[in-house]
Amino acid sequence: MKFFIDTANLAQIKEAQDLGVLDGVTTNPSLMAKEGIKGQENILKHYVDICDIVTGDVSAEVISTDFDGMVKEGEALAKLHPRIVVKIPMIKDGIKAIKYFTEQGIKTNCTLVFSAGQALLAAKAGATYMSPFIGRLDDVSTDGLKLIEDIRIIYDNYGYETEILAASVRHPMHIIECAKIGADVITAPLSAITALLKHPLTDSGLAQFLADAKK
Ligand code: G3P
């Protein structure tokens, strides 16, 4: 399973990259705003800065909601760096845009997916990645992980190559459950990824080994 980091924070992206287990980055307009990145020129430069840190795919989201606007924005984003993946919302024109980019050989990430039907459409349009938001489903008392299970079955039934990118991951158990189900990718904050490291028996065991090594 691939690990993507879900942030636009350069220090956190670098920390995850240095850990040696990072396969890519996802961003969205909210994450860019959180870092205080404003203005088209600065936003584009920030995407290039991210691409220069990592060795994997970097999702950059369009803000247009019509086909022509998404194509124009997506083509400009794709030209920024070979690692850029154009992130497109799950709306009617978004599906058309994904199909267009697929035919042009440009990678896409279909975002804001909340149902198996939406996931099926994204795969039929040829999306490289398809992002179900599991945490936001949990927030409204709907089982986000059950959606990942359903999509896994559907994609495997027909051999769709679109990768299931579990997004809106909030904690380490989400990551472990996604791995059990067979999600292709998770994108998570650095805190959820590094939380996988932690176990009190590791800490106490290491303390004991170090103490015994001094004897
Ligand atoms: O990048 C999209 C997704 O991961 C957002 O997560 O925590 O805002 O629901 P969250």
Image (cartoon, grey):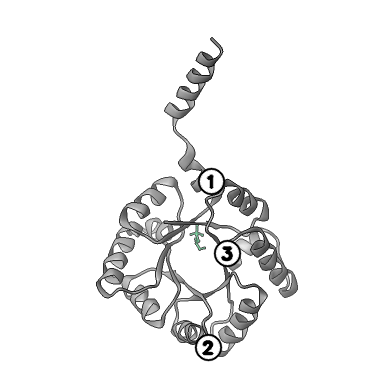
Q: Quadrant of the N terminus?
A: bottom left
Where is mark 3, residue-wise?
Answer: 27
Sequence-wise, the earlier of marks 2 and 3 is 3
Task: Give the answer, above or below, for where 133 lies relative to 204.
Answer: below
Q: Is mark 3 within 8 Å of ligand 1?
A: yes
The residue lying furthest to the bottom in this view is 68
Q: For label 1, count other residues whose C-alpha is less than 10 Å away and answer few (under 14), some (14-19) or many (20+).
A: few
Cα separation, mark 2 vs mark 1, equals 36 Å
Q: Is mark 1 within 8 Å of ligand 1?
A: no
Task: Give the answer, above or below, for where 100 lies relative to 135.
Answer: below
Query: Toward which corner of the image does residue 136 lie, by quadrant?
Result: bottom left
In the image, which disc is placed on residue 114?
A: none
Where is mark 1, residue-wise?
Answer: 191
Cα separation, mark 1 vs mark 3, equals 16 Å
Cα separation, mark 2 vs mark 3, equals 21 Å
Sequence-wise, the earlier of marks 1 and 3 is 3
Q: For label 2, count other residues whose C-alpha is less than 10 Å away and answer few (under 14), some (14-19) or many (20+).
A: some
Task: Give the answer, above or below, for where 206 lies relative to 180.
Answer: above
Q: Kindly identify the amino acid type of the residue bearing the numbered disc 2.
A: Phe
Q: Residue 147, percent across and down?
A: 32, 63
Q: Kindly identify the amino acid type of the residue bearing the numbered disc 1.
A: Ser
Closer-to-camera residue (52/4):
52
Residue name at image x 54 percent, y 54 percent:
22
Residue name at image x 57 percent, y 86 percent:
71
Q: Kindly identify the amino acid type of the residue bearing the numbered disc 3.
A: Thr
Q: Residue 53, percent across and down?
A: 66, 58
Left-right relation of 100 to 54 = left
Left-right relation of 73 to 122 = right
Where is mark 2, residue-wise?
Answer: 67
Q: For label 3, count other residues whose C-alpha is less than 10 Å away and answer few (under 14), some (14-19) or many (20+).
A: many
Residue name at image x 64 percent, y 64 percent:
51
Query: Toward which corner of the image does residue 39 lie, by quadrant?
Result: bottom right
